[in-house]
Image (tube, rainbow, N blue to C red):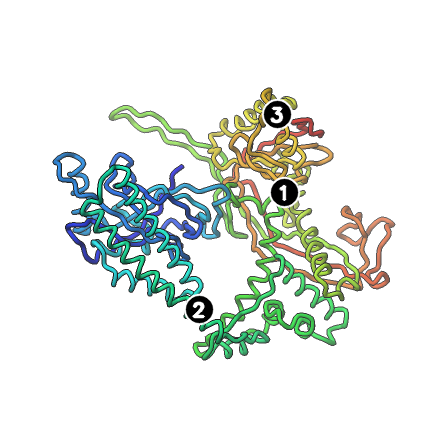
Amino acid sequence: MLHRAYSLITVKSFDPTLRTLEGIASTPTPDRMGDVIEPLGATFAADLPLLLFHDTRQPIGRVALEAPTAEGIAFRATLPDIQAPGKLRDRIEEAWESVKAGLIRGVSIGFRPLDNGIKALKTGGLHFTKTEILELSLVAVPANAEARIDTIKAIDLSYRNRRATAMNAQQTTGEQITGFTGMRTAKAARMAELMQTASAAGVTLDDPQSAEYDALQAEVESLDKHLARLSTLESTNRAAAVPAQGNSTQAAAASRTGSTQIFVRDNLPPGIEFARAVMCKLIAFQNQFQMSAVAVAKSRYPDNHRVIQYLERAAVAAGNTTDPSWAGALVDPTNLAADFLAWVRPQTIIGQFGTGAIPSLRRVPFNVAIAGQTSGGLGYWVGQGKAKPLTKYDFDRQVLPWTKVAAISVITEELARFSSPSAEQLVRDSLRDSVVERLDIDFVDPAHAATVNVSPASITNGVTPIASSGGTADDIRDDLAALIAAFVATNQNVASLVLITPNTVALALSLMRNSLGGREFDGIGVKGGTLEGIPVIASQYAHTAAAGNMLIAANASMIGLADDDVVTVEASREASLEMSDAPVGTADGTQAAVALVSMWQTNSIALRAERFINWKKLRGGAVSFINHITWGGAGS
């Protein structure tokens, strides 16, 4: 599927002889549809077609894109001067005159997302992280106000240098060297292409080609001189650099004044800093807060300012217009918890929705009524002058209230005291395991029913399973057809369909071979992938004792997810716990005679992790599943 991203044009000057357009093809700013295209993740050929209104039947020129930078992708397009009368000349003349007159004021890239190159944004748009740009078009309706045609001219080196200076004003010297090196590489490649084309035809460069080649050569020479100056500047800055003060936000702000700094940050695995903050809280708790968690952090991790800021976040002063570093005290604490959740999220079934090519669940707010669709609609053919039948949709109002998942894990006091990387990793993994298992089981277990104001029902709860046809390749295709038929019968769009199955089943499918020895189901592996073009999430929690191995088909766009993206951690040394994942205690405090383990007596600490999250099917028939599958010999 070809996607498009639109941009504005700004016409500054033009040259009627050499029809060259220069500007910005794409920027990372969200367009008016909420989508973001990552420039540094774009790939493209050295020579692309310039189209009119994305119509492949209306080519009007050629385009060369410059090396992507963090700010965007610049382009240089050329429209040929056709002398022979005819449709081609008329089309190009019309496009050229429309741009000159300001009637066409937009450019647009046509692109396709690459594998695992789409992420869902909280705003509802999409973040395209990996793309292949296929063409650039002149358009009349812009959507991105930053991508534009800056100039219509032959060559204007002075303006190009001014634009490059503005684009790189906020970049480091190293980033500027990378950007200008990419520009030089692209221009040198174009020069080589011009010469190779002429040599292959046995001719010399014509006048337009000669002018383009000479202009490119002048630009390459200018870039070489500029790169030499940047290299000298980088060496000078490196020699004059001093370490930044990181003990506090005030010291860091002061150290930035009047000199160049080197900022040092530990290259820690994801989630470790959050585990460090939890361990500092535990040690403070053990010492009955004779030493605060902040003091513990400063003692154990004096150079890890993110952990210290996270623990100091309650003491952030009110904002004012005289303290330029005030907002900085809020950024790292927020990122610290977000880093941990970003690490945990892909390890859950829920968190894999919206990653790569997997469609996203529909994000909804807590405690806000939303319309859920309970049936599909139909369209009708209508004769001339006849009344049009109405399409009937059934809706209901649904609310996802606050619900939280709480899980408890136990570590020893000795483990909490250690500051070694292995101890921190054990604490981090313990926090992860306590959250992941509960969420994944309750999201897919057919036996998990809703408890009002406590927990949501699983997406398979109340759904009648479909019997599996068997374990052969043909049986598997029959099972997939049966699943899809359940959605088609209710007029659902299957474009957002996602399959969930155990890792063992995904592995068994990847090992199946046809009569020629080739893979029967290419694209799937032990960690998921695609099955007959449908995205697959692999999780061993898609297996229960009652249902066996399951294949769950979920219409992601019809499942609502409310998540505040925060996890809180508390600790206790005095609690006595029933060390079981199925405690027999009841809400009124009565319980059977069970063995309780005292945290104080065993020198242990109980960690309780809580996360507010809820989900709900917004439409009946949004989920279908097959139980007790034995595909590829994977037992149920």
- Label 1 neighbour load within 10 Å: few <14, some 14-19, many 20+: many
Confirm whether residue 86 shows in the render.
Answer: yes
Which of discs 3 and 1 lies nearer the camera? The answer is 3
Q: Are marks 3 and 2 in contact (CB under 8 Å)?
A: no
Residue drawn 51% across and 39% down?
558
The relative height of residue 524 versus residue 335 in the rendered view (above or below) is above
Q: Disc number at residue 605?
A: none
Classify residue 393 by image quadrant.
Answer: top left
Q: Taking 634 as reference, is 59 left or right? A: left
Counting residues from the N terminus, which is met first, the one under dot 3 or under dot 2? 2
Counting residues from the N terminus, which is met first, the one under dot 3 or under dot 1? 1
Q: Disc number at residue 234?
A: 2
Residue drawn 63% across and 50% down?
453
Instruction: Point out residue 325 in the picture as x, y percentages from the top left corner.
Output: 49, 74
- Label 3 neighbour load within 10 Å: few <14, some 14-19, many 20+: some
- Amino acid carrying label 1: it is Phe
Q: Are marks 1 and 2 in contact (CB under 8 Å)?
A: no
- Label 2 neighbour load within 10 Å: few <14, some 14-19, many 20+: some
Instruction: Point out residue 403 in the picture as x, y percentages from the top left corner.
Output: 62, 51
Classify residue 258 by image quadrant.
Answer: bottom left
- Amino acid carrying label 2: it is Glu
Front in this rendered view, residue 157 or 310: 157
The relative height of residue 343 versus residue 553 in the rendered view (above or below) is below
The relative height of residue 153 versus residue 490 in the rendered view (above or below) is below
User: Mark 3: which secondary structure?
Assistant: loop
Question: What residue did someone put label 1 on?
Answer: 443
Q: Taking 369 as reference, is 54 left or right? A: left
